[in-house]
Image (tube, grey):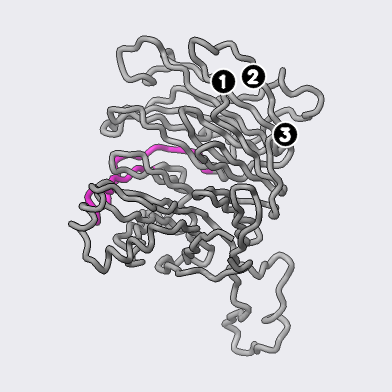
Amino acid sequence: MNDLRLPDYTLRFHKSSVTTLLVLQLPGDPTPVLLSGDATGVLILWNLITRRPITNYHIETSPRLVALQYIGLASVAVLCKDHKLRIFNIGDLPRWKQVYEIPINTLNFANFVIENLGDAWFRLICCNTQDAESIDIYVFHLTDLHSLRRVYKGLKFYESLIPLLGDTVKLDKLGIAMKFVECNGVIYCGMESGFVIGFTMIKAKKTDGPEDEEPANQSVRIVYVSNVHYPDPVLDLCVTPQFILSSSTGNKIGVHDWRKLSYPNSSNENCPLVLTKDNFKRVPLSQVSHVKQVDDFLLLASWSGEIVVLDQHYAFIAKFVKSKSLLQVTENSKGNLQGSSATTLSKENSLNCKITSLQGISAVHVRTEAENKAMSATISMGKKRRLQKFIENAWCIVSYEDGSIAFYRLEEA
């Protein structure tokens, strides 16, 4: 693979910065789709084979969209910068139906996590509505707008970690929550201070209602602590089949083995908590704002607009960059292309287009007989060939500040 590559193709429809991406596999549809959201409240669902929008929706107040999560039941949660989390049912497209709305803190960069508890009950983990240094935990029923209950308010971990800190860590707070992910029943929270904290909810042995409906029926337990990025902030977290990966402003990726956690059950409730700090890999990139793993490829995106692709051994494979146009447009009729104001770029103005979101799609090498029959029944032979060509490759998907979404085919070196 060449060290520097242009996109294989680009999607264009958004008229403002694309701020968040989500790859979906909708029930009964053999084709993966892409959901994108932008800085003016526009959501677009893309057909990745025809490379055209399937449908779009504009949130009336035009808020900047922060994060997306598919929560099951044909529903997508959308975090908006107007301090609201909206849940839309997309099971009857092209019709979008908002089914829930929750006030939420969007004063920092943090996303959110929603856990499906079953029977249309969900648990929401997010920043506290007034203090971004603490966490709120809610439960709600998707069909009951009055079911929302805050089971934990202003949850902080600093005091619980004091015995672990010792003399090597000098801080009096963990800072704001920067990023959340969920893996195997544990919520991982990346903090401004560089800590990655894993916690879980302890279920009551007996309950008459939904498992997590009442505060008395649950408690929070910390099961993992790492200060691998201290004192630099955690910028991103992602889940892989073996690890939780974290990134920061330095040139190392935190590697958190979620398979070795001491989960709170009858046999290991009293396992001591250990502070982990040497669990990282050096990478040929700093200020890693986004990290993703797709099959055996590690994708890293930086504030400077570079994407680096590494293999499973952290060896360099390729780099992707989208350059800005050097021709600056001015409405001043007296201007000219020879003037220094039109050709001089400041140090703050990078030549690369700013990356706003990063996703990936894994390759599909084998399909079941049922999937093949479903595909043959719903699409033509021509579309089937294009679909097969698409799904047999792994892809890196990047959105940019200029509203474009680029696709790069991932290949071994």
Query: Of marks 3 and 1, which one's residue comes earlier in the chain?
Result: 1
Q: Is residue 46 above or below residue 112?
A: below
Let me know if residue 412 is in the magenta part. Answer: no
Q: Label 1 crowding class (10 Å Cα cut-off): few <14, some 14-19, many 20+? A: some
List the residue tagged with mark 3. Answer: 278
Q: Which residues are magenta?
A: 86-106
- Give SS at disc 1: loop
- Give SS at disc 3: loop
List the residue tagged with mark 1. Answer: 262
Q: Can you name the residue that lies furthest to the right here?
A: 167
> Which quadrant of the figure has residue 85?
top left
Q: Position of residue 406 (x, y in %)?
A: 48, 65
Are circles 2 and 1 on residues that touch, CB within 8 Å?
Answer: yes
> Which quadrant of the figure has residue 151?
top left
Query: Relative to 4, is 122 on the left or the right?
Result: left
> Which quadrant of the figure has residue 363?
bottom left
Query: Relative to 274, is 354 on the left or the right?
Result: left
Q: Residue at x 62, y 63 (%)?
A: 319
Camera-nearest label, 3 or 2: 3
Q: Label 2 crowding class (10 Å Cα cut-off): few <14, some 14-19, many 20+? A: some
- Give whichever of 51, 39 is nearer the camera: 51
Q: Is residue 303 above or below residue 12?
A: above
Q: Which mark is residue 273?
A: 2
- Mark 2 belongs to which amino acid? Leu
Q: Is residue 149 above or below residue 282?
A: above
Q: Position of residue 156 (x, y in %)?
A: 60, 25
Q: Residue at x 40, y 51 (%)?
A: 23
Query: Of marks 2 and 1, which one's residue comes earlier in the chain?
Result: 1
